[in-house]
Amino acid sequence: MTSQLPRGLTALIPQSQPSTPGQRAAAQLAHLREASLPIPVIAAAAELIAARLDDPDPVTRAAAGTVLARLTAALRAEASG
């Protein structure tokens, strides 16, 4: 029998079992200093993250709000610059 190893993005995120999407995002945000992405990717990410603002998990809602604020600030800076 083969063991089930994490795959994709989840494999890169340190986590305790069980963890919520917000807990995993919060762990990543703690280490984020700078990232460069094309504007369309930032805009798409902002739309996807916005859907998590109503998540039942309070940690996920808080992480989504923080990420959305950063993405929105990046979009505004690009638009004004």
Image: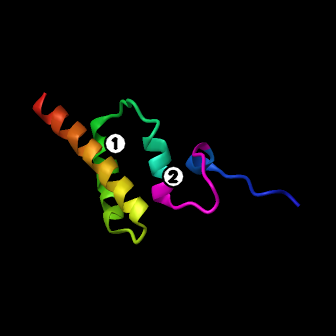
Q: Identify the main secondary structure in magenta.
A: loop
Q: Is residue 48 left or right of residue 15?
A: left
- Name which of mark 1 and mark 2 comes first in the sequence: 2
Image position of 46 with respect to 55: above or below: above
Q: Is residue 34 left or right of residue 2?
A: left
- Looking at the rendered image, the quarter that the N terminus falls into is bottom right
Q: Position of residue 31 (x, y in %)?
A: 47, 36
Could you tell me which residue is drawn at 45 percent across and 49 percent down? 26
* C-alpha separation, residue under disc 1 versus residue under disc 2: 20 Å
Q: Is residue 38 left or right of residue 24?
A: left
Question: What colour scheme does the image use?
Answer: rainbow
Q: Which mark is residue 41?
A: 1
* Quadrant in the rendering for residue 53: bottom left
Q: Dot 2: within a 10 Å radius of its alpha carbon, few (fewer than 14), some, or many (20 or more) residues?
A: some
* Quadrant in the rendering for residue 16: bottom right
Q: Amino acid at mark 1?
A: Val
Could you tell me which residue is drawn at 23 percent across and 45 percent down? 72
Q: Amino acid at mark 2?
A: Arg
Task: Please give the residue where the numbered disc 2 appears in the rendered image.
Answer: 24
Q: Position of residue 12 (x, y in %)?
A: 59, 43
Q: Position of residue 15 (x, y in %)?
A: 60, 51
Query: Which range of residues does the magenta coloring cover?
Result: 12-23
Image position of 14 with respect to 64: above or below: above
Farthest-out residue, right = 1
* Quadrant in the rendering for residue 73: top left
Q: Which mark is residue 14?
A: none
